Image (cartoon, coloured by chain):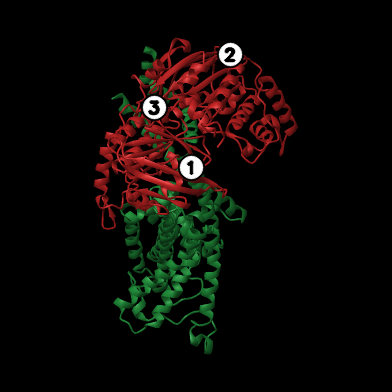
Chain colours: A red, B green
Amino acid sequence: MQTSKAQISSLRLEGVTKRFPGILACDHVSIEVKAGQILALVGENGAGKSTLMNILMGLYQPDEGRILINGHETRFRSPNDAYACGIGMVHQHFMLVPNLTVTENVALGSKDFQSFLKLDLKGARHRIAEVSERYGLPVQPDAYVDQLSVGEQQRVELVKTLCFGTRFLILDEPTSALTPQETDELISLLKRMSGDISIIFISHKLNEVKALSDTVTVLRRGSVVYRGETKDNSSQELAALMTGHEVNLPHNACEDGCGNVLVSIKDLKVKSDRGNLAVDGLSLDIRSGEILGLAGVSGNGQRELADVLAGLRKAVSGSIMLEEINVFGKSPREIIDAGFGYIPEDRHDEGIVPTFSIRENLILKDFATPRFRIGPFLRLKESEKNAEDLVRRFDVRCSSQETAAGSLSGGNIQKVILARELARQPKALVSVYPTRGLDMGASEFIHTKLLELRTSGVAILLISEELEEIMNLSDRIAVIYKGRIVKILKSSEATRARLGLLMAGVQEDGGVA
Amino acid sequence: MKTERTSTLKFARESAYFTLIVLGAIVAAVGIGAFVLKLIGVNPIDVYLVILTEPLKDIYGITEILVRTSPLILIALGIAIAFRSGILNIGAEGQMQIGIISAAAIALAFPELPKPILLPMVLIIGAIGGALWGGIAGYLKARMGVNEILSTVMLNYIAAQVYGFLLRGPMIDPEELTVGSGTPQTIRLPRAAWLDRLIPGTRLHAGLIIALVMAVLVYLLLWRTTTGFRLRASGAEPRAARFAGIHVERSLIIAMLFSGGFAGLAGAIELTGVHRRAIESISSGYGFSGIVVALFGGLHPAFIVPSAIFFGLLLIGADMTQRAMAVPANMVLVLQGAIILSIVSAQSFFKDPYAKDKFLRRLSSIHLPRQKKKNAPTSDRGGKR
């Protein structure tokens, strides 16, 4: 690579401070990484990790502080400056053009492969071969990106970044979209690579941090609260440092206090977008005061089932009873009015209207009820009171209730959604991946609230891909495979191994479903 | 105390940023216009002076600006409702024409009715005509996902043909055929269908008052009613709106009914206030200028009103330049285009925090000494660490 020959033997950020309106995002943060080291940068959402990395990549300029590379102060005015120094970043959301091939994506990313009006695809292909050989990263250079699995796309991102001559790699929550197997592969891969390059690994999954990193720096609310060797700390200790208090994700320890069957799904058949039966004769009963966990590898009909329960997808046949009401084929509005609450999968675009204020989002389902309107008019005072109350009760961190909800962190957005759904006092709640991508503190809060809701007698369907979450919270666990429930276990009977086999379609009597 | 100072500083920088971007956009628009004016061989400064000052020199000019302002406000209000509801209505021109023709038809059909009945009826029918025409595009989008930009533009052509056909055929003034020159126009509307003139001797009519009242009503509609809440939610994030039980498709249709209704009302007002008979080219591009007015006014009624006045000034100014300096009045279209480009570019600056940060950085590096002084107390604090 023409741009960077020099090895980065040490990289230091000293006293980096960055302010945003109303927030001190980074407060005199110092971190240090030496050659061949893996530093884990951990912290809750909003702790300042991403801001810090954006400063390191030259996307933001620090208000104070400096960046030292090999002891020399460096200023990055743009990401290109950072690339030129051999620093590369793999973002949480992949920056790939889906309808181009891997080679074209690599060539597009770098000036090295671009001459006037033409991409040097041959050169790019050569570089890809070089890089994937050197780091043991197999990729198919001619595959189109949208044909690749998420794990493979991740690998392409890595290769792409390495092709730019990166000697210093920043990974922003690289495992958030990966399956457990893909995560394990990535971690062993990064371990191998660390002999050659330095890595900053941003995560809040502490078991990954433990498995991978040499040193760890913990950020909390913009400041460094801990810096040290990873091996000196247990996950529990790190979690406590991150959140500032002991974190114990709550367990469903209560006795079986479940009541009558509240939600009864019978022989439900739903077609996927591709037209095949994604949910194929699924039957489930959820009792009041029960959390029913739905475990399964994603793509086995969970999405379609959730859509039908929200009223946004037409089912082919079956019935969905909530108490005496059949909500099969009803509109979203009718399902909501029947007493269903819903925490959608994509909290940012399905759970809230991002440009609406927190206040408006909190009445998104109820603005037309007598409480919030007089005739055709909204009762602003009432919605303000409602927002004030809910923001306080659910500890939504925001500068005011008029803040655009989309500008909040993931955890706070989820709190807004949860506040809205719970304030409506639903009879049943469908909760889809409620803590995906959230940090420990926020997850703890969400879990506690779900358990409280269970105690108050609501029937809860918890769809999640994190087995731990399901095992911690559920009274019973239903395993979905190819659109059918293959087995329902009591939580006490469920083990990781047993669930794993069921999820893979292996039946307990030895056959394959 | 310290935080207070930094926040005022921050605020000062924020507003400096805002002002600079807006100024930059204006300079860019004026610059592009100047470049084109230079190309056709006139002095841009003279032209701008004429456009911006000449109309303001007498009462005639000022009232004429306001005559142009009224339909612009109404159409821009409709556009704002549509855009905020997530449907891009480019069809105001056609909706306005349908409004004009239906208003004219009603006025001519019931010439005997007294004014307090006929005039409101004419205005309402005009609005309904426009609403239905707009509603077609809304229905197509909601039911079949037909792209509204295509359908509204196409409906413009159909509306223009329908309008031309009716004026040349069934609705033409019979005298034009027998003794006149065959000009495609209707007979004069009955007096009971005339909007009052506000200042005698000028064309300024009561439509301006209607437009201003409508601006207030649209504000209330969008931000104070449940319907407005539904419309804005559907426009801002249809997926979230659906999950919340809002019927997004219905919102689209309602938005287009409103949007077309305002264009139709603008047509009816132009008809009953200014021309008092349906002639060709009453709409004269208002439907398209209205889009610019709405965008320039940030899709908000409070800013649409001044924006419409400004564009009224541009339209009149351009007419006057044509007479005074032989610059084609169409030049104002070039200016409009330049303004749209500048607004869209400026908006991308407001939306992108990186661009903003970069900009502020450049800004502070220009005034480095002053900046250092202001940062002094905070860097002391850094020293202590």
Sequence order check, earlier mark of 3 and 2: 2
Amino acid type, label 1 = Arg
Mark 1 sits on what residue? A303
Identify whether A42 is placed above or below B233. Answer: above
Local SS, label 2: loop
Amino acid type, label 3 = Ser
Identify which residue is drawn at 53% across, 82% down.
B169
The spot of residue A251 in percent (x, y) is 35, 26
A296 or B106: nearer the viewer: A296
Residue pushed farthest right? Answer: A122
Chain of the residue under label 1: A
Tag 1 near tag 2, CB within 8 Å: no
Tag 3 near tag 2, CB within 8 Å: no
A165 or B141: nearer the viewer: B141
Identify which residue is drawn at 36% across, 38% down.
A460
The spot of residue B368 in percent (x, y) is 46, 25
Q: Which quarter of the rendering shows the C terminus of chain A?
A: top right
State which mark lies toward you, 1 or 3. Answer: 3
How far apart marks 1 and 2 lie (CA) works out to 42 Å
